[in-house]
Amino acid sequence: MISNGCPGPEDNHPLHGEMPCAEMERAWLEITDVGIKVCGETEYVKGFGHHYLASPNVEMFEGEAFIKMSMNVKNLSGSEMPLQYMCHTNYAYLDDAVMKQNIPDSAFTLRESVPDHVKPTEKWLNYNKNLLSGEETLIVLNQPEMYDPEIVFFADELNRYQDEAEFEMESPDGVTFFTRFSTAELNYATRWLLHNSDQKVGAFVLPATCLPEGFLAAERAGTLMKLRAGEERSFTVVTGKK
């Protein structure tokens, strides 16, 4: 919430900040005639620092193969706090799946920075060069040996293209997974692909408020959100099978 993404050389926050491994202080179910909502709540407070309440929930609906995920954050302190949020939707890798979306393919750019956790190989560096030059494209997941270490793409200012962004990953057997969200809430997207003996990831979109290059990079880019004292902000993502 306070910081996000891969920390740069001058950042002092952990990978993706303080929220991913936070324990819920309260958790409950809300059951209705149409579905079930799993809810949680956790309060972050640090002496001489920031203070907020984070309230995530995941809603499942009868007869539907998608879920609705929401995150609400409220600044409980008496001063302004920074805000960086990413909905880290980690879909599994699907051989020969096709990735598409309702924004142009050209909106995506390859990540050129190399975070500390990425250990480049010569093969990987050459593949990245080919992607940058346009000799290679990555729309179909058909070269798993090239996605180790991870291949990451960024898309920014999605509201230039759509009010509601929708991304898809279609498997060869005809099953299509999708992720849909408002670009007024989440105006940036990351595509994270990884295939090795330990992890097989086909995260065709990770919606976010900024690019995941760390706190200081977002501050320099002018994409670091601010919450006034007492202010709340909510983010909603719908994802699943069509």
Image (cartoon, rainbow, N blue to C red):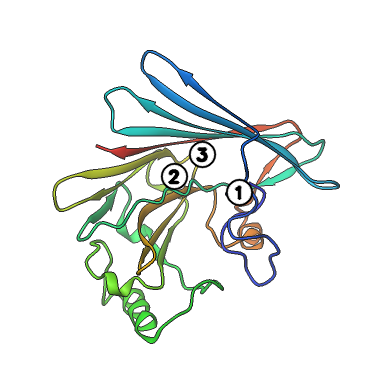
Amino acid on which the number 2 mark rests in the picture: Asn
- What residue would you read off at disc 1? 84
On residue 159, which mark appears? Answer: 2
Amino acid on which the number 1 mark rests in the picture: Gln
Q: What is the CA distance from the residue labelled 2 to the residue labelled 1?
A: 18 Å
Considering the numbered disc 3 on the image, is that residue within a helix, a strand or a loop?
Answer: loop
Q: In the displayed image of the protein, which residue is found farthest to the top?
A: 33
Q: Position of residue 184 (x, y in %)?
A: 49, 38
Determine whether 161 is above or below 107 in the image: above
Q: Position of residue 162 (x, y in %)?
A: 38, 42
Which residue appears at 67% of the width and 49% of the height?
2
Q: What is the CA distance from the residue labelled 1 to the residue labelled 3?
A: 12 Å
Specify which label sits upstream in the sequence, 1 or 3.
1
- What residue would you read off at disc 3? 185
Compared across the picture, whether 171 is left or right of 216 comes to left
Which residue appears at 19% of the width and 44% of the height?
175
State the residue in front, 184 or 74.
74
